[in-house]
Amino acid sequence: MSGINSICVYCASGPGNVPAFMDAAQSFGRILAENGIGLVYGGGSVGLMGALAEAALDHGGTVTGVIPDFLVNREHMLTRVQQRIITRDMHERKRVMFEQADAFVALPGGIGTLEELVEQLTWAQLGRHKKPILILNVAGFWDPLCVLLDHMKKLDFIRADLSINLLVAERVTEILPKLREAARAVSEREKEMTPITAERM
């Protein structure tokens, strides 16, 4: 059994046009801080990323921002975080975020958020790790993805021997309980992916 000390959150560098998205990011940042759980995120200071990190910091939380050098200016790297990690490229960014986290949460976002989420699902499906992965389906944002995954299962493109355990929370307050329950079944060894394995993915 393993605990959750830090969570990697994937989310947008923009605010979206539904106020509930920003509200969710701010609420989750506060919840992480109040529960003593470190935030690992994409390092930006704008959009949902900025709202999430600022809320965590404002409530006494610990934040690690991981950002590739070419995005430092574009996504306005947040400088008040306790740890800033600047990587050479996107691949290294994702590997570092993986290594720093015990679980993964995807808030609303665009192509980048979707790509990061799907990569974690792929690694888990292939047995590279068993860290919990959860989507916050605020305002039904992830409904289309859930429908697509069900469609893939019905067509046997996601087979029983390659099933994925994607957790879904409808409310921010559900996230930690769902992740903690899932983490109880995962040993510390099963959470690890060696640097060599990560480099080859």
Image (spheres, helix red, strand yellow):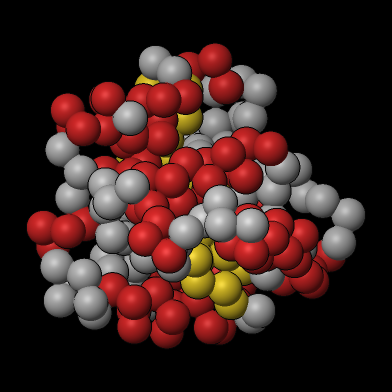
Look at the picture and state if 27 lies above or below 95: below
The answer to whether any part of residue 21 appears in the image is no
Residue plotted at (78% across, 50% down): 15
Which residue is outermost to the right?
17
Residue plotted at (64% across, 64% down): 154
Residue plotted at (53% across, 46% down): 118
**Residue 173 drawn at (x, y percent):** 55, 83
**Residue 80 drawn at (x, y percent):** 46, 42
> Dividing the image into 4 quarters, which one contains the C terminus?
top left
Task: Identify which residue, 8 or 197, lies in the foreground.
Answer: 197
Classify residue 82 by image quadrant. top left
Look at the picture and state if 194 lies above or below 56: above
Q: 23 left or right of 113? A: right
The answer to whether any part of residue 76 appears in the image is yes
Classify residue 139 by image quadrant. bottom right
Q: 145 left or right of 159? A: right
Which residue is outermost to the left?
189
Task: Identify which residue, 59 or 176, lies in the foreground.
Answer: 176
Residue plotted at (41% across, 25% down): 91
**Residue 152 drawn at (x, y percent):** 63, 56
> Dividing the image into 4 quarters, which one contains the N terminus?
bottom left
Look at the picture and state if 81 lies above or below 189: above
